[in-house]
Amino acid sequence: MQHLGLSREDEYYDRLRGEVSWIVEAELRHLLNLVTVTETCFFRDAGQFRLLRDHIMPTLMAGPERSRGVRIWSAGCSSGEEAYSIAMTLDDMGLFRACPDWRVEVIGSDLNTKALEEARRGAYSARAVRNVEGRLLEKYFLRDGRTFVLSDEIKSRVTFEFGNLTQTPRPSTGQQDIVFCKNVAIYFHPDVTRKLVRGLHGTLAPGGFLLLGHAESLWQMSEGFALVEHERAFCYRKAPVAEEGSSSVGSGFSRTAKVRLKADPTVETSTQYDLSLSLFREGDWAAAESVLIALIRSCPTFLPAHLLLGGVYAHSARYDEAQTQAESVLTLTDLEPRAHLLLGMIAARQRRPEDALQSLRRALYLDDSLALAHFWLGNLYRDRGDLARACLEYENVVRDWERHTLELTEEFASDLRVEQLVGFCSDSLTRLRVHHG
């Protein structure tokens, strides 16, 4: 507004809504360049690039429908670090040399035109390349003073274009096999995020992979995806054509993405569930169990009833029955974080720490607001002597409490109040910090 000599917001708004299209478009793009967040770096989240190298690419290359090539999209690419990290990963795999006839397209899109100009230049600061492995830094960059210039070979592997994900969630190259859309949706209103996720699902080819940021999840956002885990890294996969709606397990699937969820519960269903929850909180677990069994019999796809019944069984140390309830939820959708949380709690109580860690990590990937998942992970890390990670998990609980965003999963914590949980985590932090130095 200062640059344009405008003193009132409505004057600037009128300029953005003007009748001269080229002026409006130019001003909107200038505004977007000023307000979009462009913080990124090469190989951000190294685990997902290992996932790309060790699981996603081998899976796609083995599929008959991918015999001629692969398309990869870095959506919201900012200044290009992610897109170039993808190209470097593929080149370091030897893919371009071993398969010269294989069509590989890597495209990055963003609505910040200045960031796109930086991406095309391919010159970066030391901070941007801080996660690049030494041999890759030497192989793909030329140092020019304080600047690291990307090799022309890698730059030639990536194209960049303007794109607004809220309007056109597909690049100009068409349907994609892999989409990186990380730390983009966290800035959107939930309704916009749901629209974006639907668009990304439509953009992905059958069997394609979607990688999101740590703070993002598809839970309650979209159908048609399955959670994939490989070496503690996570992504989502769209069902291949042959498996959509089937019950078989596909390559890379933790479970098939049926997602045959119920419609909105009836008044009777909600009333019965509220009654069972009240009985559970009062400690009358036998009565709660009876109500829940009857409710599940009448409405077998009502997930809260399965989860609450699993909580009843877990509190009664009937772990096999609790596990059966959690798994029944996962046969409907493997994107339900509380089912993974329940499995993690059961495994921890049965002294199966590796299984517990795996399930709890899945739960937090799907919904990182689950306080009980952070709490149990903190306990597991503490018992393993990994005090630094234990502190991080306890800190998550205390932080969410202070921000009033703490989510205590009521069906698994009838005997635990929020204040007790936060107090335990806070006291544990104090003790561990003294011990850890």
Image (cartoon, rainbow, N blue to C red):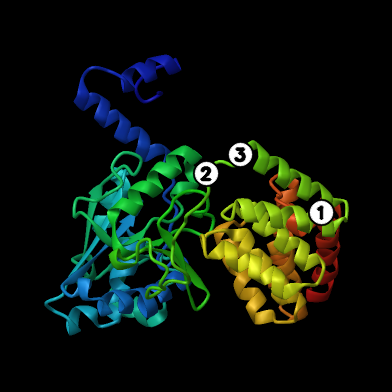
Q: Relative to residue 122, is residue 408 depicted above or below?
A: above
Q: Position of residue 247 (x, y in %)?
A: 42, 68
Residue shown at 83%/75% (left/top)? Answer: 435
Q: Earlier in the sequence, mark 2 or mark 1?
A: 2
Pointer 2: what residue? Answer: 263
Closer to us: 384 or 430: 384
Lateral position of residue 437 relative to residue 342, left or right: right
Residue closest to the far left: 101
Residue shown at 67%/58% (left/top)? Answer: 307
Give yes or no for contact between labels 3 and 1 (Cβ–Cβ under 8 Å): no
**Kind of element beneath mark 2:** loop
**Kind of element beneath mark 1:** helix
**Residue 347 placement: quadrant:** bottom right
Q: Position of residue 144 (x, y in %)?
A: 31, 68
Closer to us: 277 or 81: 277
Give yes or no for contact between labels 2 and 3 (Cβ–Cβ under 8 Å): no
Pointer 3: what residue? Answer: 266
User: Which kind of residue does numbered mark 1 sit on?
Assistant: Phe
Closer to us: 349 or 322: 322
In the image, which disc is placed on residue 280?
A: 1
User: Which kind of residue does numbered mark 3 sit on?
Assistant: Thr
